[in-house]
Image: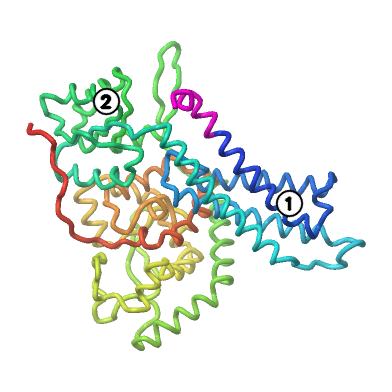
Amino acid sequence: MKILFKFQKTVVFIIKALLYLFLIGTFFVVFGTEYNWILRPSRTAGVMLVTFCVLEAALIAVYGGFLIGRLKSKPIIMSMSLATVITDLVTHLQLCIMNVNENNNAYFVYESPHLLALVICIQIALIVLFTYFGNYVFFTINPPEKCCVITSSEESLNNIMPKIRRFKKQYDVVDMIHYSSPNVFDIINRSDTIFLYDIPTKEKIMLNEYCYAKNKNIYYNFEMNDIVMLGSKTVILDDKPLVSAVVRDLTLEQRFVKRAMDLIISCVGLIVLGPLMLVCAALIKAEDGGHVFFRQLRATKGGKLFKVYKFRTMKEENSINKSVTSDDDRITKVGKILRKFRIDELPQLINIIKGDMSVVGPRPEMIENVDKYTEELPEFSYRLRVKGGLTGYAQIAGKYNTSPKDKLVLDLMYIEKYSLWLDFKLILQTVTVLLKASDSTAAFGTGENKYHFTEKY
């Protein structure tokens, strides 16, 4: 076991490389049974191989990669399967195009979908097998890290602990203490990993530096200073090392490309999803005879107000402007399905065409929530530096009931790290929201504290 621990990075790399080779081999071997020319060295076979390898690698990077040891098995399987299926579809389309020649098809034919289905089934089975095997090997080599959680209250403790407990194979929480505990340094010394959560800035800096000096792994929650640092870089002024945080804004070229992307995606989206939207409209109307659409004031860039369009998911007489709670009796039967898969948001493609919204950006909140959250978190207004969006970091990584502060951090991360490539990645990652619908649409609910400090302070 000690030998495996020493070479664990090599072991993980071998597992990843083998999976990658098996995915490529499955596609070419299965299709080679009917198109034997793709198994022979040739320019067309080479082009297809390059397409598959490059596209698969790019999409794996977009959807998170084969992160064994860092994520649970199901998210890895989902992201890897999604990347591989898209790669298969594109490469199969390329195969059909290349098969148009004097020796085969005189015109384009989308052929052998049965082979494509077989390839996808085999590949997903391989992904499942390698993912569970990879995580098994990793966690056999690496036992859970011995952790302590240092925070400012039991309320804060109960905000972070459920998140940590979801990763029991990675983290074994032994101590949960208040930052003012007289034994805080002793507890840090006997731990491998330290979680600092909701601690005053002065004390957090002191504990952070102590953990660094003792070679401890550190996790801590974002504050505004950390957000500023995201968009910063290091500079050396003469012989003085400094941090440079320059105010960012979209260039004229970026604005043009982003707006063009918004128009193209929203128009194509309305055409492709039009039949689905018509079915949704019919079901909403059939259930209670009420209005199909629901309009609500939202705030976008610069605090400008606009009316956002959504499919109505609540009973008309109870459509009060307040956040949805667990088992909310205002939601209709059709509405539950629409909300679960975020289909109720599709009419916002019209808002994007009108210029009220962008495809990617911070989620435009209800005016009531904006006033409430800004009062609690003055930094919440910083989200209004860019247009509201249909998708974004907060919509993909967060849930409906993610705390306002965490939503704010995710939105500001997007603003500070903005690039057109990031927009493209987030658009592709939006598909994953539909695949984890039950988590992403979890409503606000009430819960009791169940975690307590392991010692008095």
**Compared to 385, does 234 lie above or below?**
above
Q: Which residue is mark 2?
A: 208
Residue 183 rendering spot, x and y as whole percentages? 13, 24
In the image, 176 versus 266, the foreground residue is 176
Would residue 457 be found to the left or right of residue 78 on screen? left
Residue 252 appears in the figure: no
Residue interval drawn in magenta: 1-12
Residue 174 appears in the figure: yes
Instruction: Give the main secondary structure, helix, strand or loop, of the magenta stretch.
Output: helix
Q: Residue furthest top?
A: 239
**Compared to 236, does 55 lie above or below?**
below
Which amino acid, by three-letter code, is at mark 2? Asn
| Residue drawn at (35%, 51%) of the image | 384
Q: Which mark is residue 28?
A: 1
In the image, 253 versus 224, the foreground residue is 224
Dot 1, how many residues are within 10 Å of its Cα: few (below 14), some (14-19), or many (20+)?
many
In the image, 100 versus 104, the foreground residue is 104
Q: Residue furthest left?
A: 456
Q: Which mark is residue 330?
A: none
The residues tagged by marks 2 and 1 sit, at their Cα atoms, a distance apart of 51 Å
| Residue drawn at (37%, 78%) of the image | 334
- Between circles 2 and 1, the one closer to the viewer is 1
